Amino acid sequence: MRQRLAEAVQRLRWYRFHLSGYDIHPSCELERGLNLDRYHPQGIHVGAHTILTSRVTILSHKLIPRRSLGRYDGEKVHTYIGEWCVIGIGAVVMGGVRIGDQCVIGSGAVVTKDVPSRSIVAGNPARIVRENIEMEGIRL
């Protein structure tokens, strides 16, 4: 019974994001407390079998300072997260970043640059800890 309830809640989360315009594959696991950019929802793309843990923030815009006007304007960009990725608790993915397939983003990492496939990144700003990792045999 609990398993069915958990699956139903997972489906409801996916439908909520899908109806809002986000491009998230139905096989993704979405935990509570996700912060997905509402400024440009069509700019967030998440591949199949990816896990987005709680308090993850994904942006789809960049702020551009306008000194003459004294304000900030947002530039809409696309942010891509590949297939079979795990994004750790509290990680932030800045707008316009591409994360390759089979990547692990450490908890609390701030990803400001593209991440090649099969990499582990961690830190603020995020740096590559290891490349060419093997994800075979790991159950996500």
Image: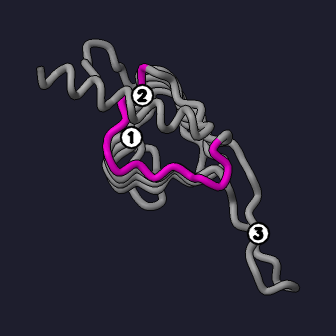
Find the residue positioned furthest to the top.
137
Q: How many other residues sit within 10 Å of disc 3, few (<14), some (14-19) or many (≥20)? A: few
Q: Nearer the viewer, residue 140 or 114?
A: 140
Whether pointer 1 and pointer 3 mark residues with C-beta atoms closer than 8 Å, the reply is no
Q: CA distance from mark 1 to mark 3?
A: 28 Å
- Quick one: SS at disc 1? strand
Give the amino acid at mark 3: Asp
Report which residue position mark 2 lands on: 50
Q: Which residues are magenta?
A: 27-41
Disc sitting over residue 87 in the figure: 1
User: Residue at (53%, 30%) from the top-left corner?
Assistant: 24
Which quadrant is home to the N terminus? top left
Quadrant position of residue 79: top right
Report which residue position mark 3 lands on: 73
Q: Residue 47: x, y in percent?
A: 52, 25
Give the amino acid at mark 1: Ile
Of labels 1 and 3, earlier in sequence is: 3
Find the residue positioned furthest to the right.
68
Q: Is residue 25 magenta?
A: no
Q: CA distance from mark 2 to mark 1?
A: 8 Å
- Quick one: SS at disc 2? loop
In the image, residue 40 sits, relative to residue 72, either above or below, namely above
Give the amino acid at mark 2: Thr
In this figure, which colouring scheme has been used for the structure?
one colour
Helix, strand or loop for the magenta stretch, by majority: loop
